[in-house]
Amino acid sequence: MTTIAERPAPTPVDVAAPAAAGPLRPLRHALALAGRSLVKTARTPEALIDVTIQPVIFLVLFTYIFGGALGGGDRTSYLQYLVPGLLGQSIALAGVSLGVNLNTDISKGVFDRFRSLPISRSAPLVGAVLADVVRYLILFCFLMGFAFLIGFRVQTGPVELLAALGVSMAFALSFCWLSVLVGMLVRTPGAVQGFMFLLVLPLSFGSSVFVDSSTMPGWLQHFVEVNPITHLVGVVRGLLLGGPVASDLAWTGGWIAVFLAVFVPLALRAYNRRA
Amino acid sequence: MPPTTDYAIEAEGLRKRFGTTQALDGVDLRVGQGRVLGVLGPNGAGKTTAVRILATLLRPDAGSARIGGFDVVRDAASVRRTIGLTGQYASVDEDLTGVQNLVLIGRLLDLSGRDARRRAAELLEWFDLAEAGGRRAGTYSGGMRRRLDLAASLVGRPAVVFLDEPTTGLDPAKREDMWTVVRSLVAEGSTVLLTTQYLEEADQLADEITVIDHGRVIAHDTPLGLKRQAGNRTLSVTPADPAQRAQVAELLAAISGEEPVALPAGGSSVPVVDDEAVTAAVAGLAARGVVVGELSLHLPTLDEVFSALTQTGPQPLANDQEVAA
Ligand SMILES: Nc1ncnc2c1ncn2[C@@H]1O[C@H](COP(=O)(O)OP(=O)(O)OP(=O)(O)O)[C@@H](O)[C@H]1O
Ligand SMILES: [Mg+2]
């Protein structure tokens, strides 16, 4: 058997002097790390359950089991109402795995290597978030495609559909920093998942995802009214089914700004502190 | 530009506390350019903590350290451009193949895609992983992972390499391979700091050894110097002609002032302290016309030194008493 001892030392390769610190350098690093996350996703297709089968199951359950009752006997019109709602809920739930994966990487020591490299400290986190874009795209296409098969119809046009996609992506990419933050703060991957469900479930059910809030008690209506998922769903409903979007869009834009301003710095700080 | 310095690694008074554990309690380290420092210590001595501080993964509570003249806290970015780190626990990505692991590091070090792939292939070849390069690292054996991890830390041809227990868990043959790698790194001009619990390893590789225990440096010397520090060298002389045994014993007794111990082959041995003992013995043997069959000065093993320094090994006195009882 050949062993290391018998091998010659490697011939020198030009390990180029560090490229000039251009503005694109951090982006290149983040993209390289995003590529890593995508390879991992492709290797473990079961990691896509939360953006494919899970939302479809919710769609089927709510449409066929509760749809008749919730829609006052009209299952098809409830489906129209439900699809934008489920999109909002699924986006919030799909963020959970990001924090879980980052936490796993850190506890396995993979990030120690990245931390010892001359790259920006935030690059591994930004890379993971960028890779999540692909998951959200899959979610959007899968959910819309399946909904179409069982009778959902966009009432407006392709421009509105693309706008809905854009707003959903923007929301997803800011909301997922909450998951990153929790992933940095909580000790084990399992605990990240538990903690995130604790946050996401009240947000997704305490909203206009499944039913209109007019039948809820007053205190809950107040919660629903400020809930970011309510407003995301409001924008998507307006865009896909027709109707006013201005107010919900303003709310959603505000929440996106708040998420980015609060969760991103906190997540980066927590990452730097985590030894 | 870094301030010019003869030392690739310099640390003074490093302290680090985790909760109630004082992991480092004022550690000084110094490694000259192109040299190998072995950091030796038992479990929990603080070796990993020291390496993580030097590699900018942890901030010291007190003290300072410079790598190639760059401060590890104030100029961490420059330090990261200088170092390669192989941590105690393999940090390879199990879902990526060997090639993908190394190419990713190359890309993060700003190599072009082509150069990154070339460097990856070259390192995999060198570490005997070329065939396994297309397989997920998760399917690698412990030794293969360890080698991939080391390869990953060498992608950027670092001037200073940290190896935290690089051979723990390797079989003896692979351990010697790893030693060969370390020697060739040094031959290429790198400075190496390696931690180990194997005294033989430090003896084999290191120019100097720093022994730490409970977060403090308890000894720093060359391997030879360390062995000398522990004293109890033994001078053994066996005459070619067994009839001259008494003459040898008498001479050795005169030199050391201690009663000689008879050796099986007709020789004698005595404990000696100073360096002149050997010269005196050779001169005395010549004057008496004794033909020497074998003459040796036995240094204590590093294990004995280590036990003496950390007081954790078997106490020779206690052993003697047991034998006597
Ligand atoms: N993150 C941490 N939190 C709490 N205690 C820690 C942490 N890291 C290290 N310690 C403690 O600091 C001390 C030194 O640990 P360190 O890992 O540096 O030792 P070591 O010499 O590398 O040991 P080993 O040979 O077992 O690897 C130990 O008592 C350890 O329990
Ligand atoms: Mg250790």
Image (tube, grey):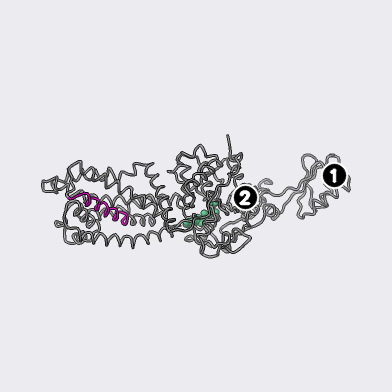
How would you rate the neighbour count of disc 2 (Cα within 10 Å): few for under 14, some for 14-19, many for 20 or more?
A: many
For the stretch drawn in magenta, the main secondary structure is: helix
Instruction: Specify the quadrant of the image occupied by residue B138.
Output: top left
Give SS at disc 1: helix
Q: Residue furthest left?
A: A73
Q: Earlier in the sequence, mark 1 or mark 2?
A: 2
Label 1 sits on residue: B246
Q: Provide the chain ID for the residue under circle 2.
A: B
In the image, residue B207 lies at what x, y percent? 65, 53
Disc 1 to disc 2, C-alpha distance: 50 Å
- Where residue B60 sits in the image (x, y, percent)? 51, 62
Query: Which residue occupies 32% across, 57% down?
Result: A174
Local SS, label 2: helix
Which amino acid, mark 2?
Answer: Val
Q: Which residues are magenta?
A: A156-175
Q: Is residue B240 magenta?
A: no
